[in-house]
């Protein structure tokens, strides 16, 4: 199994690295000191297993795990037992309390080996019962965006609109503008379709922030966003759903 370690403590990194080298079934590909480095490693390598610390600067391990749509198998490591329940709600394989012994480490890895298959999506969003007794998934209302060597948490409701510039996008919100390296299409797939729609080949708008709709543009926060003829029908359909 391809493995990464995510921990801001050098000693913890060294101990886990030593344990991994003792196990012939594990191959260590990266040691990450924070969530940003882990984010890059997961997108660079095919990772089967992640040893993830919880208490880290900027973004906790739990918050980072919630941002991954298709995470590797996860074993959490921490000195704080009070996070165990939340960790298991995210369907992690095991939860190791520091200091971690080699015996306890090996037992956790054996649990991974007993899973049906590698690369199984482990995060199971909590469900809430509807009034009819049906279950529906509870979706996150935010996204983490990589910018300036950090991950920024941004609520969907706070996004005014998004402008695409080749391989970059600019996200406009009440706090200002965020520039991140990804395509407009890739970001569009992560946005809730009930609120966001492509108004132009270079713009995605949040319907809830539209102040005016004109023949060839919409106005959001005093900014005129052009409406492309290929996107006008879909935009109008979503607007109609919000009309009284």
Image (cartoon, rainbow, N blue to C red):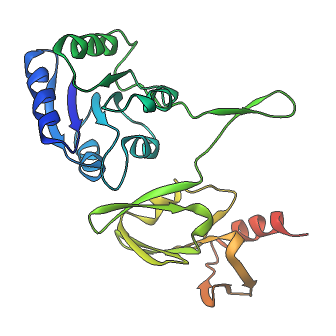
**Residue sticking out furthest to the right:** 244
Residue at image position (15%, 39%) is: 30
Comparing 211 with 125, the one in front is: 125
Asked whether, in this view, residue 87 is left or right of residue 197, the answer is left
Asked whether, in this view, residue 4 is left or right of residue 165, the answer is left
Asked whether, in this view, residue 238 is left or right of residue 11, the answer is right
Image quadrant occupied by the C terminus:
bottom right
Residue at image position (73%, 83%) is: 211
* Residue 23 in which image quadrant: top left
Residue at image position (63%, 80%) is: 227
The image shows residue 232 at horizontal and vertical percentages of 69, 74
Total numbered badges shown on the rendered structure? 0
* Residue 44 in which image quadrant: top left
Image quadrant occupied by the N terminus:
top left
The image shows residue 162 at horizontal and vertical percentages of 51, 73
Vertical order, 74 against 169 (above or below)? above
The image shows residue 54 at horizontal and vertical percentages of 35, 39
Residue at image position (8%, 16%) is: 22
Vertical order, 173 against 188 (above or below)? below
Vertical order, 176 against 125 (above or below)? below
Comparing 150 with 77, the one in front is: 77
Comparing 4 with 217, the one in front is: 4
The image shows residue 39 at horizontal and vertical percentages of 30, 48
Vertical order, 27 against 61 (above or below)? above
* Residue 173 in which image quadrant: bottom right
Comparing 71 with 155, the one in front is: 155
Asked whether, in this view, residue 213 is left or right of residue 85, the answer is right
């Amino acid at each position: 199994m391809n493995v990464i370690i995510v921990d801001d403590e050098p000693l913890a990194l060294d101990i886990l690295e030593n344990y991994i080298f003792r196990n012939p079934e594990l191959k260590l590909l990266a040691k990450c000191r924070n969530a940003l480095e882990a984010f890059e490693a997961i997108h660079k390598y095919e990772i089967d297993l992640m040893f993830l610390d919880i208490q880290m600067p900027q973004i906790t391990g739990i918050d980072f795990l919630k941002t991954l749509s298709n995470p590797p198998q996860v074993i959490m490591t921490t000195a704080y037992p009070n996070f165990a329940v939340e960790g298991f709600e995210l369907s992690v394989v095991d939860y190791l309390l520091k200091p971690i012994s080699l015996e306890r480490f090996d037992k956790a890895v054996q649990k991974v080996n007993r899973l049906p298959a590698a690369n199984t999506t482990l995060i199971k969003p909590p469900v809430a019962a509807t009034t009819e007794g049906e279950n529906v998934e509870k979706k996150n209302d935010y996204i983490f965006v990589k910018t300036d060597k950090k991950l920024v948490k941004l609520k969907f409701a706070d996004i005014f609109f998004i402008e695409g510039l080749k391989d970059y996008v600019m996200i406009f919100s009440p706090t200002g503008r965020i520039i991140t390296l990804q395509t407009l299409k890739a970001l569009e797939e992560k946005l809730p379709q009930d609120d966001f729609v492509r108004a132009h080949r270079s713009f995605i708008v949040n319907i809830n922030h539209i102040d005016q709709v004109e023949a060839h543009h919409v106005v959001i926060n005093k900014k005129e966003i052009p409406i492309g003829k290929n996107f006008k029908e879909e935009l109008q359909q979503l607007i109609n759903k919000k009309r009284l």
